[in-house]
Amino acid sequence: MATQLTDSNFKETVLDSNKVALVDFWAEWCGPCKAIGPMIEELSKEYEGKAVIGKVDVDNNPETAMKYGIRNIPTLLFVKNGQVVDKVVGAVPKANLVAMLNKHLS
Amino acid sequence: MQRRTEVRLCCFMTEQQHFPEIENLELLANQVVEGFIIGLHKSPFHGFSVEFAEHRLYNPGESTKHMDWKVLARTGKMFVKRYEEETNLRCQIVIDASSSMYFPKDEGAKINKLRFSILSAAALVNLLKRQRDAAGLSVFTDKVTLNTGAKSSTKHHQLLLHSWKNCWRSHH
């Protein structure tokens, strides 16, 4: 299951991690977020141990959302060594995310 | 998709005992497309090109046309819906109208290569018209005899059909 990220554990789980992280900013009421939700869960299983796959509920964690200037949801951030290295806005096919993850993992 | 249209068109051609007159070109082209279109899309206004992709924060002053009112009512937050960009196809149909296209030259033959091309092109344009895509036409022999831009208006599609009718008649 994808890691539930919050304002309090974001730094420790994502920024301080030595793994690549894929962070999904979502909200319960957002249709496209629900559409990509299962895809994120699948990725968390497929990349277990290789990458951190986490989700941030923007309603409950406004600080993190504000810090990264999230104005659109879903927004997916790829974080490597504490830095945002890629960003995807909107619902995209799984293949795109896999390609981007592999690119940052290599 | 293209392959299915082609197959259907070929079946349609071979089924015709007496090839209909050119006045029916629009109807003929419609018949070919009709059977193909049914069941493919519910409506040209729905589908991939207008897929709901994301929510964006509403900027004060912008149009409320795409406001997600349900989200506003449920959460008090102002978000607008954003859709996938429209994918527009611009199709240019190029027809060779040189003498080799008169094959078979048999007087009794109701159809030759050129007539087949014209009907195929008319069917394709009908398909494009229904998808709100732009179509243009170029006809050439040893020189370019007709060249139109690609447009998606009904008037332009009628102009193309009219050009084909002329082309059909002048090469009969």
Image: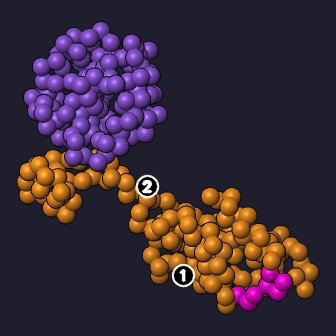
Q: Residue at x 12, y 19 (%)?
A: A8
Q: Residue furthest front?
A: A1
Along the line of sight, the residue nearer the viewer: B59 or A62: A62
Q: Name which residue type carries label 2.
A: Phe
Measured from the top left, where is residue B122 in percent x and y? 63, 75
Magenta stretch: helix, strand or loop mostly: loop
For the C terminus of chain B, which image quadrant?
Answer: bottom right
Along the line of sight, the residue nearer the viewer: B170 or B127: B127
**Chain designation of label 2:** B
Say above or below: A11 vs B24: above
Quote the CA–CA distance across marks 2 and 1: 29 Å
Check the rendered structure and report the hue given to chain A. Answer: purple
Q: Return the mark for residue B48.
A: 2
Q: Earlier in the sequence, mark 2 or mark 1?
A: 2
Q: Residue at x 50, y 64 (%)?
A: B41
Measured from the top left, where is residue A101 in percent x and y? 40, 23
For the N terminus of chain B, which image quadrant?
Answer: bottom right
Which element is circle 2 on? helix
Frontmost of labels 2 and 1 is 2
B157 sits left or right of B46 in the view: right
Q: Is residue B58 visible?
A: no
Say above or below: A79 vs B166: above
| Magenta part of the chain | B16-22
Tell me which corner region of the image, top left, top right, bottom left or bottom right, holds residue B28: bottom right
Residue that numbered label 1 is attached to: B159
Q: Residue at x 43, y 55 (%)?
A: B48
For disc 1, the neighbor class at 10 Å (few under 14, some 14 to 19, many from 20) is: some
Which element is circle 1 on? helix
Check the rendered structure and report the hue given to chain B. Answer: orange
Q: Residue at x 49, y 59 (%)?
A: B89
For disc 2, the neighbor class at 10 Å (few under 14, some 14 to 19, many from 20) is: few
